[in-house]
Image (tube, rainbow, N blue to C red):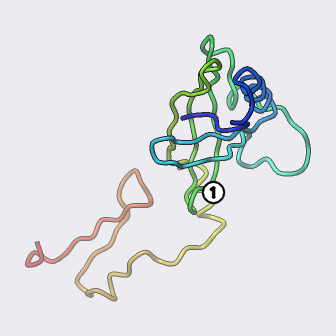
């Protein structure tokens, strides 16, 4: 992960701008290996409005490790609820980050936005049995007659 803002400015100025942007609740980063650029907002996903707010330590934490800032940014990426989590070194302006599925927010979104059925066993064969997997409501078990196995 690298901070991508103000690439035309001196490194010391970029460091200051990055820290100020984090304190304001936003930043631009890139997964360098894939060329994926993200504009992150470090606030709870349900925060709306034009109110100027300071992100909490849960989203921007300068105190967890000396010389690094730990960040958390919920978002919807290609229709999927995810959370970007990572840290960036305050001197080098690079670090580590990853995206993880936001199951809690996805369940809220699923309740609001109706989805078409993923698969209907009756269309394929009346002998199929379809049930939700234990532990993950987005996965299905399909039981086929013995001759299909």
The residue at 26%/87% (across/down) is: 125
How many numbered dots are placed on residues in this image? 1
Residue at horizontal 75 percent and vertical 25 percent from the top: 19
Give 138 or 10, whichever is nearer the viewer: 10
Give the quadrant of residue 54.
top right
The quarter in which the C terminus is drawn is: bottom left
Image location (x, y in percent) of residue 139: 38, 61
Residue located 55% across and 48% down the image:
102
> From the viewer's perspective, is 119 left or right of 59?
left
Q: Is residue 141 left or right of residue 90?
A: left
Please identify the quadrant where the N terminus is shown: top right
Q: Position of residue 101 (x, y in %)?
A: 50, 48
Residue 66 horizontal/vertical position (percent): 62, 10
Location of residue 26 with respect to 109 vertically, above or below:
above
User: With respect to residue 53, does 39 lie above or below?
Assistant: below
Badge 1 crowding class, 10 Å Cα cut-off, few under 14, some 14 to 19, many 20 or more, is: few
Location of residue 81 in the rendering, given as x and y in whole percent from the top left corner? 58, 54
Tell me the residue at 12%/77% (across/down).
Answer: 148
Front-lying residue, 97 or 126: 97
Q: Quadrant of residue 44?
A: top right
Looking at this rendering, what residue extends furthest in the right direction?
A: 51
Residue 23, picture quadrant: top right
User: Which residue of the protein is positioned furthest toward the left in this rendering?
Assistant: 147
Q: Secondary structure at mark 1?
A: helix
Q: Is residue 7 left or right of residue 65?
A: right
Q: Which residue is mark 1?
A: 108
């Amino acid at each position: 992960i690298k901070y991508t803002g103000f690439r035309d400015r001196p490194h010391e100025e970029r460091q200051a701008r990055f820290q100020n942007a984090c304190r304001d609740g936003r930043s631009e980063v890139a997964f360098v290996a894939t060329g994926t650029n993200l504009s992150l907002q470090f606030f709870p996903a349900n925060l709306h409005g034009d109110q100027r707010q300071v992100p909490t330590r849960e989203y921007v934490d300068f105190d967890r490790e000396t010389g690094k800032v730990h960040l958390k940014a919920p978002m919807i990426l290609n229709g999927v609820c995810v959370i970007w989590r990572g840290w960036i070194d305050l001197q080098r302006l690079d670090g580590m980050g990853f995206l993880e599925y936001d199951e809690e927010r996805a369940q809220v979104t699923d309740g609001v936005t109706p989805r078409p059925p993923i698969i209907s066993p009756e269309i394929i064969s009346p002998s199929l049995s379809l049930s939700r997997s234990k532990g993950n409501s987005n996965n299905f078990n399909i039981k086929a007659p013995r001759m299909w196995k």
